[in-house]
Amino acid sequence: FQKHAATLVRTVEYARHDVGIARGFRAALTIGGRFGLWEQFLLPWLPLMRAAAPDVSVRAEIGREAELMQSLVEGRLDIGVMYAPESRPGLKVELLHEERLVLVSTDAKAHDQPGPDYVYVDWGPEFYARHSVSFPDFFGAALTVNIGWIGLQHILERGGSGYFPLRLVNQYLATGRLTRLAAAPEFSQPAYLVYSAEGHEDFVETALDGIRHAAQHSVSQS
């Protein structure tokens, strides 16, 4: 049984590290979010949380909706930030802000329709539905990604076009590396805050207030 015993010991140690409170802190907070929502939104919130609650350790995770929701249900996550949450008993879903998804291209003269160099970013089922209605002749892209960062880096390096949150591409629009194709439709992508509907610790409320404030700032910059 030595091999199995060693595996069990490693599992216990991992679980202790995963859910335990680091020495010197009174509590631990675990937050998970979509990759695109960490960029220029949740990432700047992290130091603000550290300043507001220096005695709370923070564990930050990236995931998609299904795994984030499952972690929330199982109690492994305190807070989830995502685009398409499910309604689950015991969890509160709160509208955080509305992302503005705009079509941008490295070619200022590009057509306002998906072309051969178009990168389709999977922003979720609602985006897919609206995208299909707006571009009925679109039958698929040569490159499809489920993380916006990958698509954005690809077109910045290799050229092309794609839909991205305005807050993520503003800096590239300002420098001229990207051009917004204004004639193309703009899509709204709501982002949500998900957390326990029951009572929670004061540091969780501190985190929620900080995220709400960061969301307001993010919207004002879009």
Image: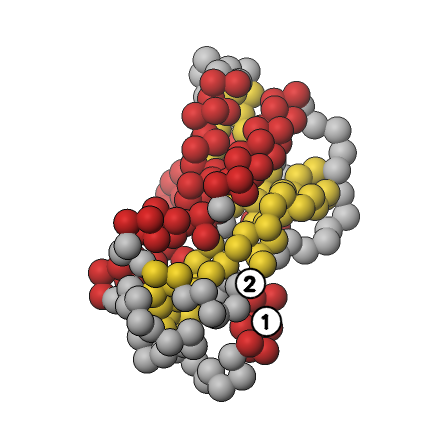
Which residue is disc 1 drawn over?
130
Tell me the crowding category of disc 1: few under 14, some 14 to 19, or many 20 or more residues within 10 angstroms, Cα based: some
Q: Residue at x 63, y 43 (%)?
A: 96
- The spot of residue 62 in percent (x, y) is 46, 46
Q: CB atoms at circles 1 and 2 under 8 Å apart? A: yes
Give the amino acid at mark 2: Phe
User: Is 140 placed left or right of 110 in the picture?
Assistant: right
Identify which residue is drawn at 54% across, 84% down.
136
The answer to whether residue 84 is visible is yes
Foreground residue among 206 and 172: 172
Q: Is residue 103 above or below residue 51?
A: below
Residue 31 visible to an observer of this rendering: no
Residue bearing mark 2: 187
Label 2 CA crowd tier, 10 Å (few <14, some 14–19, many 20+):
many
Taking the spot 51% from the left edge, 79% from the top edge, the residue there is 135
Up/down of 65 relative to 220, above or below: below
